[in-house]
Image (spheres, rainbow, N blue to C red):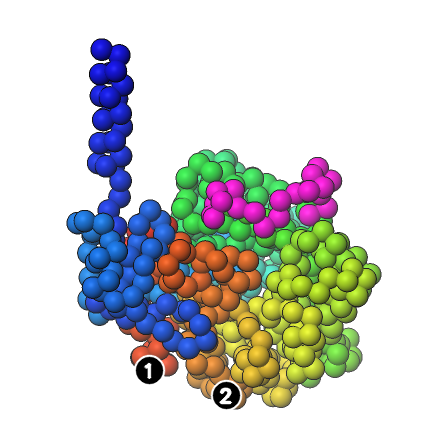
């Protein structure tokens, strides 16, 4: 009787495994672009089983490799590519911004005038923490000029309103908002500005730099863990609907990291989440665990991980905070011969670069102007010399907007990956021509030059500092069109395949995940995206209009276009 029970139990276990085991899925009948290698390669079919790609090749062999009765997924002529990898962005800020009204150029109803903007606030905004909140505002896209405090006061005389700029570095509040924040003309500012109207002598409501960061923290305030998780779900939908299967959040706090890990561990979201803390937070991590596991996922080949250490050298170029070796062409409102400013000392950069190389913590630089880049390069070179480390640590410098030709040679020598943000060309190209001159503006984000030197480079959106669409950023890299329709630096344009690599194989390499992500290859995770058209086969100007049909994470549909 005992043996019978054992056999019966084994039978139940065996049959339950058979019943609940997932059948293989075969993707076929479309352009399957593997992103494997330097040139476009296509396969006829892909077999996915148990969250991984198990075969790529012709359909006949795919069917023989799949189990009996596989799920046949007909692409119907659409395009299958690897999932997009977010190499530089603000997942937690995107989540937080879902508590306000999205006024971005990529929103469902982007405002074209200040009255449309105010109309959307009145119709859609629900007070949160005592505020009407809106995000992603960009005055360049309004035909009647920037929003003013007078317009906000007229529309909301007693209700505090906060309109955060798409850059996240600036914003505007109404008079009720200034009062609630306790901001006056006497308010001290360490970095940034609280502008005063020279005609009236009154505050304009604009907050730039530190004052805007202070306002953002006060406006959103602290909210529950449950609401945080709900905002994470909404953020995941934004990322997945744009084809991302891995998301990053830089400048994270310890609270951000705990929330990100909890969201993944509790399966609140399915994206892989990567945190990138500043050097101050890294100091805290190392103080509690000198062997903190940087670069290690919580679930083996996915989940949550802390990537490395972030060191910034300067600020936003469109606000003239980027640090340059030569003065800005237009210094209106700044001292004569203004070159921007460093946000860190060379001693600090040197210290943390050496720490990164000594402890094998991946170094993430953030530099915009060429003088800011010089600081990062000097710190990295010194760290390499003093530690003797010559291996490829996947060191990178994000943005690298105005990197010089000679600096790119140093990138190559010291194995530094440039991580570019082409959307600044579209959003601020006309601004850069004015404040930096035609030559420097035309040579910003030098993609073709970088490629010609044999350097890999990644692309990113820095969401929410630009829209969440990888395809829009790829369009910008390929066409280099400014918002006004002009082309900026035509000789630095690149082909669509190279741009696609910037969101797939290169960031996989950046994160040291090239063995599991970045291409459609047997053995890698089934993180893939279905597009309605092939970016390599459409008119380059149509790339931004390609639609995400489906996003697949670990072999399962994460997003399906309605």
Q: Disc number at residue 539?
A: 1
Which image quarter is the N terminus in? top left
Sequence-first disc among 2 and 1 = 2
> Which residue is drawn at the image coordinates 50% and 35% (left, top)?
224
Left or right: residue 201 versus residue 423 is right
Q: Is residue 62 above or below residue 50?
A: below
Q: Is residue 483 above or below residue 193?
A: below
Q: Is residue 115 magenta?
A: no
Residue 74's spot in the image, x, y percent?
Answer: 20, 61
> Which residue is drawn at the image coordinates 20% and 52% (left, top)?
71
Would residue 71 be seen by someone viewing this image from the given angle? yes
Residue 397's spot in the image, x, y percent?
Answer: 64, 67
Left or right: residue 304 versus residue 475 is right
- Quadrant hosting residue 550: bottom left
Q: How many marks?
A: 2
Q: Nearer the viewer, residue 449 or 422?
A: 449
Which residues are drawn in magenta? 282-303
Q: Nearer the viewer, residue 278 or 100?
A: 278
Q: Secondary structure at mark 1?
A: loop
The residue that mark 2 highlights is 490
């Amino acid at each position: 009787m005992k043996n019978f029970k054992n056999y019966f139990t084994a039978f139940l276990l065996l049959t339950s495994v058979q019943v609940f085991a997932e059948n293989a899925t075969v993707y076929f009948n479309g352009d399957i672009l593997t992103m494997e290698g330097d040139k476009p390669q296509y396969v006829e079919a892909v077999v996915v089983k148990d969250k991984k790609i198990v075969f790529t090749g012709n359909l006949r062999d795919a069917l023989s490799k799949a189990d009996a009765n596989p799920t046949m997924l007909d692409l119907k002529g659409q395009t299958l590519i690897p999932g997009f990898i977010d190499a530089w962005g603000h997942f937690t800020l995107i989540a937080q911004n879902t508590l306000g009204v999205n006024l971005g150029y990529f929103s469902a109803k982007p405002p074209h005038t200040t009255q449309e903007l105010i109309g959307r606030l009145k119709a859609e905004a629900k007070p949160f923490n005592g505020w009407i909140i809106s995000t992603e505002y960009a005055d360049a896209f309004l035909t009647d000029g920037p929003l003013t405090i007078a317009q906000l006061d007229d529309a909301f005389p007693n209700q505090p309103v906060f309109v955060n700029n798409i850059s996240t570095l600036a914003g505007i509040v109404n008079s009720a908002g200034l009062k609630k924040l306790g901001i006056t003309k006497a308010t001290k500012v360490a970095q940034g500005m609280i502008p005063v109207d020279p005609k009236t002598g009154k505050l304009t409501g604009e907050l730039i730099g530190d004052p805007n960061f202070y306002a953002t923290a006060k406006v959103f305030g602290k909210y529950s863990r449950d609401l945080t998780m709900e905002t994470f779900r909404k953020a995941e939908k934004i990322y997945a609907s744009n084809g991302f299967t891995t998301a990053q959040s830089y400048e994270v706090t310890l609270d951000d990291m705990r929330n990100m890990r909890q969201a993944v561990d509790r399966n609140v979201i399915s994206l892989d989440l990567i945190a990138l803390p500043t050097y101050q937070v890294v100091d805290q991590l190392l103080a509690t665990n000198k062997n903190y596991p940087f670069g290690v996922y919580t679930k083996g080949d996915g989940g949550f991980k802390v990537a490395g250490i972030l060191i910034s050298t300067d600020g936003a170029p469109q606000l003239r905070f980027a640090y340059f070796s030569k003065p800005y062409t237009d210094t209106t409102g700044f001292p004569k011969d203004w070159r921007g400013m460093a946000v860190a000392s060379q001693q600090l950069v040197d210290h943390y670069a050496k720490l990164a190389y000594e402890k094998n913590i991946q170094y993430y630089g953030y530099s915009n102007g060429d003088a800011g880049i010089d600081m990062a390069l000097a710190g990295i070179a010194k760290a390499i010399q003093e530690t003797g480390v010559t291996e490829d640590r996947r060191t990178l410098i994000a943005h690298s907007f105005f990197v010089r030709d000679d600096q790119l040679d140093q990138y190559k020598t010291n194995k530094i990956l440039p991580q570019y943000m082409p959307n600044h060309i579209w959003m601020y190209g006309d601004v850069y021509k004015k404040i930096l001159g035609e030559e420097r503006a035309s040579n910003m984000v030098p993609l073709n030059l970088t490629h010609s030197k044999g350097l890999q480079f990644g692309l990113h959106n820095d969401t929410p500092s630009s829209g969440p669409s990888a395809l829009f950023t790829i369009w910008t890299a390929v066409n280099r069109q400014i918002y006004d329709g002009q082309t900026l630096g035509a000789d630095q344009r690149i082909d669509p395949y190279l741009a696609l690599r910037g969101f797939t194989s290169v960031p996989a390499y950046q994160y040291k995940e090239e063995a599991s992500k970045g291409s459609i290859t047997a053995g890698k995770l089934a993180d893939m995206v279905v597009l309605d058209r092939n970016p390599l086969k459409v008119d380059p100007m149509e790339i931004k209009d390609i639609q995400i049909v489906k996003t697949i994470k670990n072999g399962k549909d994460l997003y399906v276009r309605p």
